[in-house]
Image (tube, rainbow, N blue to C red):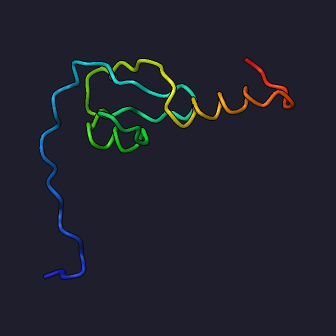
């Protein structure tokens, strides 16, 4: 009847809330998923955490890229740094 209208997409039921806390980079907000650091948006979409009764607990950390950037800046003595 209306061929150019998109069809409704049925989403699967949300996954159970994660029992283990998620680890998030304190600087770039990437979240560790297994051995990889992925953008928080992907994790929110994957877990559908917006449907949880409470937001998941995030443990702070530094991702590999941010840690390397900090160590690289500290290694250069000619550039002032903070923290």
Horizontal arrangement in the rendering, residue 4 relative to residue 80 (left or right): left
Q: Quadrant of the N terminus?
A: bottom left
As displayed, is residue 5 above or below residue 76? below
Residue at 65% in and 28% down: 71
Please identify the quarter of the rendering in which residue 8 is found: bottom left
| Residue drawn at x 40%, y 41% as measured from the top left | 38
Q: Is residue 55 left or right of residue 81?
A: left
Q: Residue at x 40, y 21 (%)?
A: 58
Viewer-proximal residue among 78 and 36 = 78
- Indicate the position of residue 70 as horizontal and vertical percent values: 65, 29
Quadrant for residue 43, please give it: top left
Residue 3 vertical position relative to residue 65 in the rendered view, above or below: below
Q: Is residue 21 above or below residue 2?
A: above
Give the quarter of the figure containing the C terminus.
top right
Q: In the image, residue 24 lies at what x, y percent?
A: 44, 27
> Vertical placement of 62 versus 1: above or below?
above
Q: Tell me if 47 is positioned left or right of 61 in this view.
A: left
Which percent across, then down, holds residue 2?
A: 18, 80
Which of the 4 image quadrants contains residue 80?
top right
């Amino acid at each position: 009847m209306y061929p150019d209208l998109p069809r409704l997409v049925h989403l699967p039921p949300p996954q159970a809330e994660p029992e283990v806390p998620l680890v998030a980079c304190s600087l770039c907000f990437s979240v560790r998923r297994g051995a990889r650091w992925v953008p928080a948006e992907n994790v929110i979409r994957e877990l559908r955490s917006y449907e949880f009764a409470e937001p998941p607990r995030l443990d702070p950390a530094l991702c590999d890229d941010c840690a390397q950037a900090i160590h690289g800046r500290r290694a250069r003595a000619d550039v002032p740094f903070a923290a």
